[in-house]
Amino acid sequence: MKNYTYPLGEAYFLDQLFPTPEIANSDLNFKTRADVIRHYSLKSLAADGIEGIKEVKVDLAFGSYQVQIEGEFDWEKVDRFAKRHWQVFSRSYAQKAIRGRDLMKEMGVWNPMEGYHVNLNPFDGTSKWTLFPPLGLNISGQKGMLLMHYPPWAVAQAGTFDNSMTMQRWSRLLEKSGIDPSQVNRYKTIIDVNPVAAPGSGESEYPNDYMPIMMASAFFDGPEERNYIKSMLELYLTPPDWPEENTYTLPLLICGSPLYDPQAPGWFRTAYTDLLPQDEKGIPQVNVLQAGKFRVFPDSKRETPYLICNHMIAAGVTGRCTSDPSKMPDIRLYEAQDMVAATFLKLYTDQPNRDPKDVKVEACNRWFGNPEGTGAPHPPEKEDQLILCALAQMDLFFEHDPKPRPKYSYEEAYSRCQCNDPMGNPCDGGIKPPDRSV
């Protein structure tokens, strides 16, 4: 039996970065902050695909937390994980979120709706905020990165992103792009521009936006002592075993669009204004399916390929069957754009040194039948047409009792599309959803 022990950091800081035990659902049986840290450490080890772990212990001694991993594991992988795990929560990275939060409290803008309901979800209750960096996600084995807005309160309650509708849908898209199911977790690592767990949909729905672009730019970006977002991106985009010869870092999806949760692309536009393409009026652009590359910091060693995409749950929230599949919010356009995003990551895994615009062209040709991803989607392959249709059926037919979920499994939705006349159209024939058509 192997035993690997390492320090994770001072309790003074980690107690502010990991949620209190009381937040979690009772079935997790958290009693102490050490229980919370142990839980998320186990989740991260699993996400990184590190096998042979028999036990993880977290102890508090002399004001610091120490992690002990036991089992028959690959020593090199655990060593890589441990060194990066400590680094993530160090003064140079996640601890910068504390400085941003403290400034918000000093200015009186931390949780402005405290004590009041901000959405209709009975499980969220009143507005509560807590710092929440990327907990329980990849530490050293990520293969693609997501830039998003903020983690919903339900994630802190459940102790995992896996149960969220957003990540369940994203997993389906990744698999249908061709990524092996055993590798899907490596494409679900998130850096939030506001690392604050708060009631889902309640803090960002318009006009009640309590976590705007300004909040990210002012409190989690800026001078070195609180440039949380860029520091975390710089760290996570280059895993510890990233080949020295690679031209680029990992690819980054910047998730959000004007119709749903645009804060991550909005922050990206304010942070990298001078690097972005402009329209004829000189306005910097962050449009869905826009591809390019940038350096996180001016002196970053490598450029990062990026693609602007929808929020992963937007299709299920605002997608509809309309008379024009080439315009939002048509569900067919949503599905094709989302599959381009998933395929963008998949293609980079296969060929990490390709120019992002070339990767986008290949992905768009597959799901739209043209290199720009414009117009109504017309995938050249019949199988891809059926994939888009099945995904749309799952997003169009949704049930809320006993818990929110798609009415149909993927196999059921695929069969409906295959047997429909016309085949492969989720918005026509016998599978058209009358209650959501406009």
Image: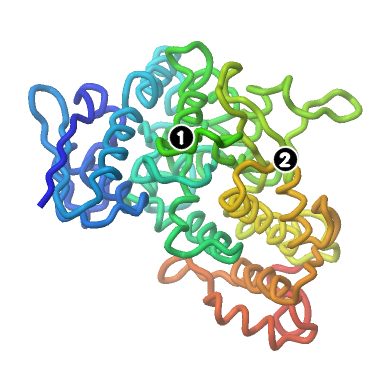
Q: Position of residue 6 (x, y in %)?
A: 18, 33
Disc 2 element: strand
Would residue 211 be found to the left or right of residue 430 on screen? Answer: left
Direction from residue 341 to residue 195 in the image, left or right: left
237 with respect to 157 (left or right): right
Tell me if residue 221 comes above or below residue 367 in the rendering: above
The three-letter code of the residue at mark 2 reads Ala
Judging by the rendered image, the residue that carries numbered circle 2 is 291
Residue 24: where, in percent of width, then height? 27, 47
**Extreme residue toward the front, this view:** 245
- Mark number for residue 236? 1
Which quadrant of the rendered structure holds the C terminus?
Answer: bottom right
| Neighbourhood count class around disc 1 (C-alpha, 10 Å): few under 14, some 14–19, many 20 upward | many
**Residue in view at x 30 percent, y 45 percent:** 77
Tell me the CA gap for discs 2 and 1: 20 Å
Q: Residue, x 65% and y 28% (percent of image)? A: 294
For this view, does 309 lie left or right of residue 156? Answer: right
Residue at 49 percent of width and 68 percent of height: 405
Which kind of residue does numbered mark 1 sit on?
Tyr
From the top left corner, tell me how far across and down residue 428 is, in percent: 78, 78
Decide if residue 433 is in sight here.
no
Pick the residue in front: 197 or 389.
389
In percent of width and height, residue 387 lies at: 66, 71
